[in-house]
Amino acid sequence: MNWLDKLEKKFGRYAITNLMLYIVIIYGVGFLLHMLNPEFYFQWLALDPAMILKGQVWRLVTFIFMPPAYSLFWILLSLYMAYFIGRSIESAWGAFRFNLYYFSGMLFTVIAAFIMYFITGTGIYSVGFGTTYISMSLFLVFASLYPETQFLLFFVIPVKVKWLALLDAAYLGWAILQAFLPAYGGGINGVYYRGQALAVVVSLLNFIIYFLSSRKNSRFRPSQIKRKVNYKNKINQAVRERKTYEGGAKHKCAVCGQTELDNPNLEFRYCSKCHGNYEYCQEHLFTHKHVE
């Protein structure tokens, strides 16, 4: 049992189910605030360590109100994608691990902002530290869990998520590289690019920590997730197509033909490896020959 398992066992009951729905609502509120007053976010909500040290501690949390887009079309698309990706990750990891990933991403971002503040003596280089890189690291998580999922690039071209993730990683790599290039590394601009590089690094650090911690946990492997989804689909299909057997029985073993009417203590399960909706009693679930 690794440290994530221990934390989940101890604090799992406190996890926020469907966390991404609340995050998306926060993004939406941030967009509305921007439409009403574009300066409000930076004046009162942005991650500014200087103002936090002066007592505006709410900024430690409210920086996530930064919207992922600033036009109506793109904000709607961004909110939909954020919710879809977040819910998909939560369904694979569980609510606790997804909560921990997102909130630790926020914590690392705050730490990066304060590092920039103590280096530069000003908070202006970290006020742009929103949730952009947290969202990009979430996309990498999604791509590692569901690499074969297809999105329509430009709403026309079908592209698998794993290839889009490579573009995502390339963009993050470029954001880090800029901090070390002479063309970007001088003066005020250099400080800005180094700050952005630091924000990228902490978002990737979050990604690396969680996947190294979960690398031995087979239930997070894409193949196991796909198998789990296929099994659920079979169960749902079987329920929709379920027939009532002789005498009103709803379960019948495909090997011995027993039903719950023959023996009320029997348990029945569908086999995820058989092609078709075949149900077996507990005596034959692991001993039957799989139907190809």
Image (cartoon, grey):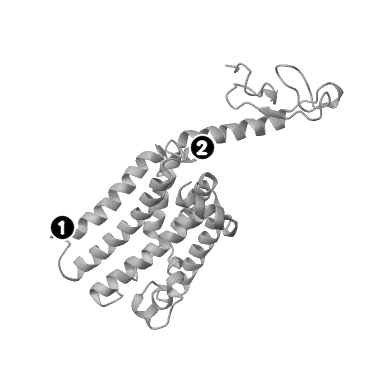
Q: Which mark is residue 123?
A: none
Which-is-in-front pick, marks 2 and 1? 2
User: Toward the viewer: 97 or 120?
Assistant: 97
The answer to whether mark 2 and mark 1 are in CB contact below 8 A is no
User: Residue 193 or 213: which is nearer the viewer?
Assistant: 213
To which quarter of the image does residue 47 belong?
A: bottom left
Q: Residue furthest left?
A: 182
Other residues around mark 1 within 10 Å, as few (<14) / some (14–19) / many (≥20): few
Single out the residue that lies furthest toward the bottom.
54
Can the viewer see residue 285?
Answer: yes
**Number of the label disc, if any, that sits on residue 181:** 1
Tell me which amino acid carries mark 2.
Ile
Q: Residue 130's spot in the image, x, y percent?
A: 39, 65
| Residue drawn where x is 43% and y is 74% of the image | 59
Q: Percent position (x, y) of residue 131?
A: 40, 61
Q: The C terminus lies in which quarter of the figure?
A: top right
Give how far apart the Cα atoms at labels 2 and 1 are.
Answer: 41 Å
What amino acid is labelled 1 in the image?
Leu
State the residue at coordinates (46%, 61%): 103
**Compared with residue 123, is residue 150 higher up or lower down, i.e. above or below?**
above
Q: Tag 2, which secondary structure?
A: helix
Q: Give the vertical position of 150 relative to 70 (above or below).
A: above
Q: Secondary structure at mark 1?
A: loop
- Could you tell me residue 24's position as x and y percent? 51, 59
Residue at (43%, 60%) from the top-left corner? 104
The mark nearer the N terminus, 2 or 1, is: 1
Residue 69: tell me if it is visible: no
As drawn, the residue found furthest toward the right would be 247
The tally of labels here is 2
Circle 2 is placed at which residue position?
A: 225
> What's the residue at 47%, 68% (across, down)?
30
